[in-house]
Amino acid sequence: MKRYSAFAVAREALRYHLGWERAWASPEPRRKYDIIIIGAGGHGLATAYYLGKNHGITNVAILEKGWLGGGNTGRNTTIIRSNYLQDPSAAIYEKARSLYESMSQDLNFNVMFSPRGVIMLAQTEHEVRGYKRTAQANALQGVTTEFISPARVKEIVPIINLDGPRYPVLGGLSQARGGTARHDAVAWGYARACSAMGMHVIQKCEVTGIRSENGNVTGVATNRGDIDCDKLGIVVAGHSGHLADMAGFRLPIESVALQALVSEPIKPCMDCVVMANTVHGYMSQSDKGEMVIGGGADGFNNFTQRGSFHHIEETVRALCETFPMIQRLKMLRQWGGIVDMTGDRSPILSKTPLGNCFINCGWGTGGFKAIPGSGWGFAELMARGQSPLCDAFSLDRFREGRFIDESVAAGVAH
Amino acid sequence: MLILECPYCGVKGEETEFAPGGEAHLKRFGPGSSEDDFNAYLFRKENPKGVHFERWRHAHGCGKWFHAARCTMTLEVFGTYPAQTTEPPQDIRDRITAKRPGWSWRELS
């Protein structure tokens, strides 16, 4: 792999950019790999990357039924934060956030991580109390957050309307080191690094069955033939239940549609991410100038990758009250992704009832921010059988009643 | 857009008139049941790509609970039927078979 650098740009400029090579290879699948990861989204690719980087396992294939990062990795609002209440969540999301800081250097690929700050608005007395509590918990967890006054919110976000008719802004939970990154680049950067380590990133390869013998996984059946493996990692977000069926177990997961939309590009007006969980909407401005907007998930099972129209209406209505200047913006695009929701709104990174088969799923509406931390922990779990980052997120926790209850802790816009 | 018809008052409306209530025909396991049964009842959800049976409530109408047979891949509704039953009526199952031959959901098919 040729490194990207200022020197490389200058060199290619002098020879009509003919020397750039493909960022990753598209090899034919081998008969057998040490480890197969199903799903080449952010989490799957990050898992493969850390398997190679941290554990020296490079005989790895990442199988993707569509194209690289074409699922939820390319369908989110790119927000990165770690201001969670529960200890296991704060640990894995903070690990992820810290890895994002050095990701561009680490992968030699510009993921455009922009630590511009994230503010979660407190718009009721309950939210004020909740976020003050989260700030205290974060202080103990080593996550830097603070509860800020309405005046400070206005200072950071001049376009905000503090006196909303029904829900005035009473303060905010600010994480100055949170921010955004370019979602596609995260998938591409990991894929390029995995390919450079000799791993096989195989696109348009759909898994149609999971083979096992004596309770241990032996391989997968795909539309490009059978492939054997010693260990299998299932990292397929919304389709986790479908793959778990193939592997012969059930998950405490329901898949629903979550939507986002972006406006026409405008001049820079807001240099941080604002989440308004009571009125249900969140917004940031992309580097292109588009206002990136997200809202609520549907309440029923859905695999259509498009959500209900009334959620757009609710979200936009709330944001128009909060940011009156966006009222006349035209929306350019709207899309939906299928998110895998667990009962406690926390992910599952776990061994499964099938031997040597591992699953990483249940990230629900908040997976993008966790990509590097999830990959780091899940690679450790797959390589060593346990990981301090993942152990609390095991599949048994539902049966044992050890919930990691973030549905309350994180408000709604998770 | 998801359009449902309330089987009680016959009103057809889009989804904002109704409230989703999750998986249908759950068999409840409470105190005295085995841990496996209780775990399965609480957490092992049906999450099919395709034919699904759900509970809905006509929240902004007559307020009654009912069942819906729906496809999660297309939002097509095969039919709705009253809540006072432990399994879908035969005519709705036949309608599903006509449109989705070979469907299955739990022990139904």
Image: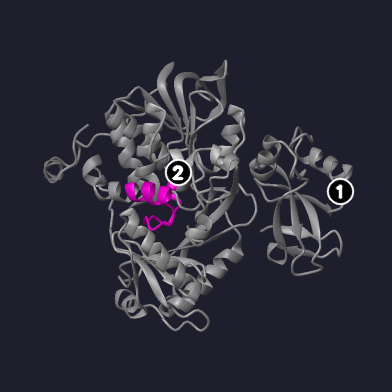
Taking the image as shown, residue A142 lies to the left or right of residue A122, namely left
Q: Nearer the viewer, residue A406 or A267?
A: A406
* Residue located beneath label 1 in the image: B85
Residue A124 shows in this picture = no
Taking the image as shown, residue A121 lies to the left or right of residue A56, namely right
Picture layout, residue A269 above or below residue A100: below
| Mark 1, secondary structure of its residue | loop
Q: Is A86 one of the magenta-colored residues?
A: yes
Picture layout, residue A28 above or below residue A342: above
> Residue at position x 77%, y 34% from top?
B107
Front of the two marks 2 and 1: 1
Q: In this picture, which residue range is highlighted in magenta?
A: A73-95
Q: Position of residue A306 (x, y in %)?
A: 57, 54
Dot 2 crowding, Cα within 10 Å, few <14, some 14–19, many 20+: some
Q: Nearer the viewer, residue B35 or A76?
A: B35
- Chain of the residue under label 1: B
Looking at numbered disc 2 in the image, what kind of residue is underneath it?
Gly
- Chain of the residue under label 2: A
Q: Nearer the viewer, residue A140 or A405?
A: A140
* Residue located beneath label 2 in the image: A70
Residue B79 shows in this picture = yes
